[in-house]
Image (spheres, rainbow, N blue to C red):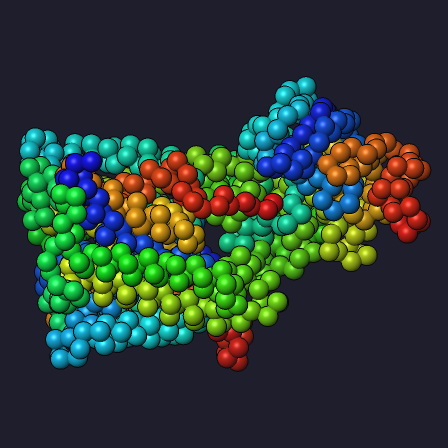
Amino acid sequence: MTSLFLNSRWPGLALLTVVVMALPAILPNAFYVDVAIRIAILAINGIALNLLMGYTGQISLGHAGFFGLGAYGSAVLTSHFGVPALLALLASAAFTAVIAYGVGRVILRLRGHYLAMATLGLGIIVSIVLTNEAAWTGGPDGMAVDGFTLFGFTPSGERQWYWVFAVLLVGTVVLAQNLIDSPAGRALQALHGSETAAAVAGISVRQRKIAVFVLSATVSAVLGSLTAHYSGYVNPGLAGFLQSVELVIIVVLGGMASIYGSVFGAVIMGVLPQVLAGYEGWDSVAFGVIMAAAMIFLPRGVVPSLTAWLRSPNRRRGEGAAC
Amino acid sequence: MLTVANLSKAFGGVLAVQDVSFHIPAGCVYSVIGPNGAGKTTLFNLISGLYTPTSGSIRFEDREIAGMAPERLARRGMSRTFQNLQICRNLSAIENVMVGAHLTLNANMFAGMFRWPGLGRADRACRARAADLMERVGCGAFVRADAAAMPYGALKRLEIARALASDPKILFLDEPAAGLNHTETHEIETLVADLARSGLTVVVVEHDMKLVMNVSGRILVLNYGRKLAEGTPDEIRTNPDVIAAYLGGDDEEE
Amino acid sequence: MSSELLQFILSGVTLGATYTLAALGFSMIYNASGVINFAQGEFIMVGGMAASFLTAAGVPLPLACVLGVMVAGVIGWLIERFAIAPARDAEVASIIIITIGVSMIVRGFTEILLGKGAYALPHFSGEAPIALAGATILPQSLWVLAVCALIVAGLGLFFGRTRIGKGVLATSYNRLAAQLVGVDVRKVLTLSFVLSAAIGAVGGVLVTPIATVSFDTGVMLGLKGFVAATLGGLGSGPGAVFGGLFLGLIEALTAGYISSSYKDAVPFVLVFIVLVLRPQGLLGAKPTDRI
């Protein structure tokens, strides 16, 4: 019975929906709502990266670069050119997709550490450009961004924005889960498992990698645009190496190839800095210890290790510890 | 069905396959034998598009396919298994087989994300067929297993099921019996014969002589990358070159 | 050659020597364990910080430098023992996370113990620039170059001539085979971590008089070392030397002739181009998959 329960997609989705619906009533003030929103943003970004990394097996150490492109695309287009927010969002997403396609075509032939290096470089280049083109981007200090108006409605304040990101999060989870369970998702996982086997089965390995890279980058860009409007402010740090690393941590800590793993990873990465804020140096140490320890003791990530343990029939006899 | 002419492949200065020509008739079990390093797997990799030939031609159903990418060959009805298993250990056993049926399903990413009408039904039908295939090749016991948890012998069969899932016209099996025990080898032999009876062309690289002699319609013998002999099992058995070079001149194999 | 160009080349080579030391550390660990150690930059930082702190506390400079390198070596040993060894069979991404985690721990403790401020060391042999064909070079730069050359030569001897060095090489080619012929793979791993930590720290100690150091300097230096190692071809010793020097030169020339604000982007643009043209790095061997 447990196994049937764990294999179904509904319990997870129901739990997520309930939590998302209940949170605004529980959270005491705007600060906490903001933390919840930040977690949702990290979770959506994490899921986007997980499609690429966890499911398709292509590491990216520069994913925040795409988030930054979306955020700055919207910021620059709305502030300097007076483009309506929705149009700016679409244009930034399209621009990011084109960049991702061009870059993906050349770098997705690389493997392992070389791909890590190339994506890392991509992210750093984006953040350096954003820092240096100060006339457009405000340089290292960043720039202000107006609100987001769509069909006459302008979300304002944390509580309204909360619902925007809540709907996005649940939507992303559903769509990602659909994709993973579909033939297309299987093809992605197959080329992770064995590129040779995938190719022989008729899967166009290179096109599939590029497609998921573009999809993942575009989701991050759209999210970046909305985040820029929500924050009312962007700076180059958004696209920086540390942000990219944070996303990788979310994916790996929560669990590669686990959608809820990314949600869990986002919760940890969203809450931990708040808990550790003010302990300078110690926050970094604690983060590091948690990351290293999680990978050493739960190498598959927290959520997959946990479900494996729950599924294991021997656990009551204490033999079924995951991995 | 498949005609190979003057095929060569060089790795650096080494000629792994050298000027090899042969013809595989439709509906036949065609075996490729030869000592280790004779170029058998290289030949398979050339035909299935994993390597690009240095020179020569490969014609499949009267079309030149030399150098064509594996995914395009799959579309034309070619399928294969691997000597060193190529299993997706991140997927379940049955999903591995369903991967083989990739071309029969709508694998568009957006169709998947938005649950295109009919996609779910097609996928369920595919799953049922995959289960049947696993049953047919003799690993039905693992229908609910994770690929990573399966024993070697079952994985060899799983690869055959995956290769069959694409409904190929020609199937290449690279050492299907390697590492299997006597009973298992016999089961593979029966399976290969069955597949051929159902009209599939099966090409086998195999070291087990008994299996090869029992199932093959024709046999190609490679030695040091060159064609040593080609013919029916009886012709090969009595060919003095084969006996000298491959069987080592004594009667060990019988 | 114009004196301006010579000046850029001199500073480029000095910079390149530092990158070489970082890249050598990357390659050594990569060879022995297949791991890209994202904490490599922290060894450079620790070497510089520890030596500076000790000097400021009154320890004589040479002793402080040696102690700084030793501290880094001990940290390298600790990392291998407690973070890398237990995760032997983890995936590439997991090990990357572990080394990033470790780098955060090292950075955090440094911040706690020594604060956020920048540290400096006195120049080893004065600060009077030496004139050279119209350009000038700091005596400290000569120190950097000389010690870097010594280390490269020493490593060449170590890997080429000694039994344990050959064992390290054997392990990098084929772990199992090395184990079978009696190489103590565990010892090889420990050795490569300690050695690359020490080499990184030497780099840190040498450049601190020129560049100053603070708890977060290691991040960018580490990344550039990774770039240099990748440029030359991961795991290749000559590749690391070549990649480091090449990177330093290009960076200095860009800063001099094109734009100093984009000089930090140069390594990454460069590695991008190189990887696109030659996915295995400039001096790396072409990988072959056996199917």
Q: Residue at x 78, y 58 (%)?
A: B181
Residue A299 appearing in the image = yes
Image quarter where the N terminus of chain B lies is: top right
Q: With respect to residue A113, does C277 lie above or below?
A: above
Q: With respect to residue C168, does C54 lie above or below?
A: below
Q: Nearer the viewer, residue C125 or C220?
A: C125
Q: Nearer the viewer, residue C109 or B111?
A: C109
Q: Residue at x 12, y 34 (%)?
A: A77
Give the left or right position of residue A172, taking residue B140 as reference.
Answer: left
- Farthest residue, direction top: B62
Q: Position of residue C187 (x, y in %)?
A: 48, 72
Q: With respect to residue A147, does A254 lie above or below?
A: below
Q: Nearer the viewer, residue A14 or B192?
A: B192
Q: Position of residue B72 (x, y in %)?
A: 56, 29
Q: Quadrant of residue B43?
A: top right
Q: Residue at x 81, y 49 (%)?
A: B208
Q: Quadrant of residue C266?
A: top left
Residue A253 appearing in the image = no
Give the left or right position of residue C199, taking residue A236 as reference.
Answer: right
